[in-house]
Image: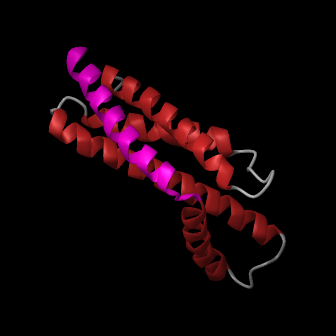
């Protein structure tokens, strides 16, 4: 059911996802930013804000901090997972795998590689601080206009 908390959560976390995407784009190889990077960051942020954080809005400001951090972790997880899955699909079209299990295992190895490459200190600090602020803003609007 749509609520103000869900809407504000989706907007805040979509903005956070896009900003994290902007910060992380410098850590890709020269000119190798995937074409789906910006939609992925924005949609993953909107989804985690709507489903994870917005659903829990209205429980107080202390839980809002935890909700914001949980939403940020969900945002980062889905970005890394979808990026790794798309890379695995591209590699499978080039016949890089002998069987499906090898491809499935490679999704998680690719995710770890992406996390190490994109997980720089400025991105991590921005994600944590932005997640807390987005959680508090979502809580404020979720309580005020419930």
Q: Which residue sits at x=59%, y=55%?
A: 82
Image quadrant assignment for residue 61? top left
Q: What residue is drawn where x is 38% and y is 30%? A: 9
Residue 15 inside the magenta-drawn segment: no
- Asked if 126 appears above or below 124 in the picture, the reply is above
Q: Is residue 121 above or below residue 136?
A: below
State which region is magenta. Answer: 118-146
| 49 displayed left or right of 30 | left
Quarter of the image with the N terminus in it: top left
Left or right: 78, with 61 as reference point? right
Viewer-closest of 122 and 33: 122
Instruction: Tell whether 47 sits left or right of 69.
Output: right
User: In front here: 23 or 138?
Assistant: 23
Viewer-side residue, 130 vs 46: 130
Residue placed furthest toward the right: 94
Looking at the figure, which quarter contains the C terminus? top left
| x and y, in percent, of residue 14 in the image | 50, 33
Coordinates of residue 52 in the picture (x, y in percent): 35, 42
**Residue 10 figure quarter:** top left
Residue depicted at 70% across the width and 45% down the height:
36
Which one is nearer the viewer's eye here, 96 or 121? 121
Residue lying at 19% horizontally and 29% vertically, measured from the top left: 58
What's the magenta bit mostly, secondary-structure-wise? helix
């Amino acid at each position: 059911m749509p609520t103000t908390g869900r809407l504000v959560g989706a907007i805040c976390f979509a903005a956070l996802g896009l900003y994290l995407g902007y910060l992380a784009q410098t850590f890709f190889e020269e000119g190798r930013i995937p074409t789906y990077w910006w939609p992925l960051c924005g949609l993953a942020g909107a989804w985690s804000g709507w489903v994870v954080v917005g659903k829990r809005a209205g429980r107080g400001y202390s839980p809002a901090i935890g909700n914001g951090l949980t939403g940020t972790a969900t945002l980062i997880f889905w970005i890394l997972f979808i990026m790794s899955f798309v890379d695995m699909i591209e590699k499978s079209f080039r016949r890089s795998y002998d069987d499906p299990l090898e491809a499935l295992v490679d999704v998680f190895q690719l995710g770890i590689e992406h996390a190490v490459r994109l997980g720089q200190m400025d991105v991590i600090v921005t994600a944590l601080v932005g997640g807390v602020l987005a959680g508090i803003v979502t809580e404020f609007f979720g309580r005020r206009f419930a």
